Amino acid sequence: MARESEKRRYSRSSGSDVKNEMRRYKKGKARSGRGGKGGRVKSRKQAIAIGLSKARKKGKKVPKNKS
């Protein structure tokens, strides 16, 4: 019963954006910075943050960035 009243913080489709970015990170293709011109993504946390940022830009349901 309690689960029905709880709202999702993240949309299901935003999870797929994070999954895609994690895949890129594991292959070594994920890059940070404007237009992917920065350095290589070195941590899982960084890859997740990039995936969430991409989901935000697409207008998906993702909480606001804290920093």
Image (tube, rainbow, N blue to C red):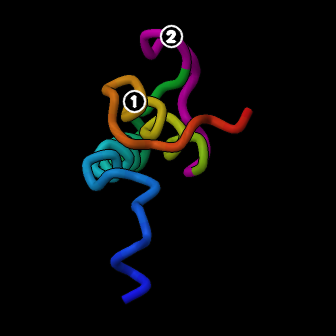
Q: Determine whether, in the image, residue 23 is placed left or right of residue 46.
A: left
Circle 1 Cα neighbour tier, 10 Å, few/some/many (<14 / 14–19 / ≥20): some
**Residue at the location (74% across, 32% down)?**
67
Instruction: Give the tally of numbered discs.
Output: 2
Magenta-highlighted residues? 33-44
Residue 63's spot in the image, x, y percent?
Answer: 53, 43
Circle 2 Cα neighbour tier, 10 Å, few/some/many (<14 / 14–19 / ≥20): few
Q: Which residue is mark 2?
A: 34
Magenta includes 40? yes
* Nearer the observer, 18 or 12: 12
Q: Check disc 1 and report its element: helix, strand or loop.
A: helix
Residue 60's spot in the image, x, y percent?
Answer: 33, 37
Magenta includes 64? no
Quick check: 1 above or below 6? below
Instruction: Give the residue type that dot 2 points to.
Output: Arg
Q: Which residue is mark 1?
A: 54
**Residue at the location (40% across, 60% down)?**
8
Q: Residue furthest bottom?
A: 1
Q: CA distance from mark 2 to mark 1?
A: 12 Å
Instruction: Give the residue type that dot 1 points to.
Output: Lys
**Residue at the location (32% across, 42% down)?**
17
Question: Which quadrant does the N terminus fall into?
Answer: bottom left
* Nearer the observer, 42 or 2: 2
